[in-house]
Amino acid sequence: MIRRVRSLFLSDIHLGTRACQAEHLLAFLREYECEQLFLVGDIIDFWAMNRSVHWPATHNTVVQKILKMARHHTKVCLIPGNHDELLREHAGSNFGDVHLLREHVHVAADGKQYLVLHGDEYDQVTRLHRWISVLGDMSYTFLIHVNRVLSWLRRKLGVSGHWSLADYAKRNVLQAVSYISDFESAVAHTAAQRGLDGVICGHIHTPVLRQIGGVTYINCGDWVDSCTAVVEHMDGRMELVRWEPEVRAANDERGKVVPLHAADAA
């Protein structure tokens, strides 16, 4: 059954890389019909494609699916991130009914206002030491590949539920925890300074919905590891959801949407 919602927010898809879970994203998009689709940065990974291009048919299908949604009365907005920063010079333009924006203030159905941006401008490593960021990106990609092997073993052993090696490392290494906390606080502070109710971003691949200093901070997560997205329901309620693939027969992509957190419970 199709879920009808007001808005979908997706970030960090990283098309053009082996880590991109395009099949799961396509299965997720088949579950929803939305009035607005916000692509919150790092949709195409030009950084990785400079090293090695990986563009299977499923990646092309993702692009075609988004363009089809734009043609069929879904407002599609793309806010480039640091991995697809080449598109930033075209902010304010439309390409195939896709609107390119530097950032956006989204007014939800309940009247609350959310700053929508990728967030890399609040990452001091990305801004000041790009070579460290590139090295970190390569290390993160390695962890994702290791995690895929572990996920396969877990399924074979009948262990259910989502578990991520990359997420475990981010949440248990002191420096990573401090980095994430600093980033979240900086982004939330900007929204508060502008008098907004919340912020929706991406960049750090850490899906979360919580209150920071009276502001609703929402991170969309990614589609290389967590397979998460933000949903705005028709009443304006924001919800963070995860697509969890199920054990499936060959060529039969199945899964389920799992709610992670809702704004009214924050």
Image (cartoon, grey):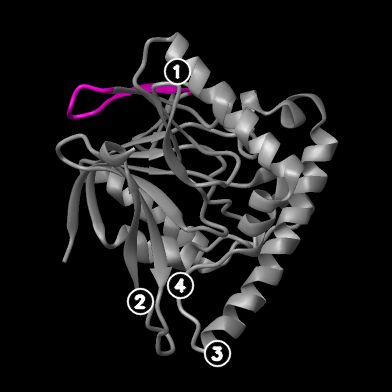
The local crowd at label 1, few if under 14, some if 14 to 19, many if 20 or more residues have their Cα within 10 Å, is many
In front: label 4 or label 1: 4
Query: Which residue is denoted by mark 2 in the rendering?
Result: 254
Tell me which numbered mark, 2 or 1, is placed earlier along the sequence.
1
Rendered view: 211 above or below 46: above
Kind of residue indicated by mark 3: Leu
Are the residues flagged by discs 3 and 4 in contact, CB closer than 8 Å?
no
Of mark 4 and mark 2, the one earlier in the sequence is 4
User: Could you tell me if the residues under marks 4 and 2 are in contact, i.e. CB atoms within 8 Å?
Assistant: no
The answer to which of marks 3 and 2 sits earlier in the sequence is 3
SS class of the residue under badge 1?
Answer: helix
Q: Which of marks 4 and 1 is nearer the N terminus?
A: 4
Q: Residue at x 61, y 56 (%)?
A: 167
Was residue 108 drawn as part of the magenta stretch in this picture? yes
Q: Name the residue under label 1.
A: 191
- Amino acid on which the number 1 mark rests in the picture: Ala
Q: Closest to the observer: 28 or 211?
A: 211
Please identify the quadrant where the C terminus is shown. Answer: top left
Residue 9 x %, y %: 38, 42
Q: Is mark 3 on a helix, strand or loop?
A: loop
Q: Mark 4 points at which residue?
A: 161
Tell me the residue at 56%/30% (across/down): 184
What kind of residue is marked 2? Arg
Q: Give the range drawn in magenta.
A: 102-112
Helix, strand or loop at label 2? It is loop
Q: Residue 139 carries which label?
A: none
Q: Distance between the residues labelled 2 and 1?
A: 37 Å
> Does residue 194 appear left or right of residue 202 in this picture?
left
Task: Please name the residue that numbered disc 3 is placed on.
Answer: 157
The three-letter code of the residue at mark 4 reads Gly
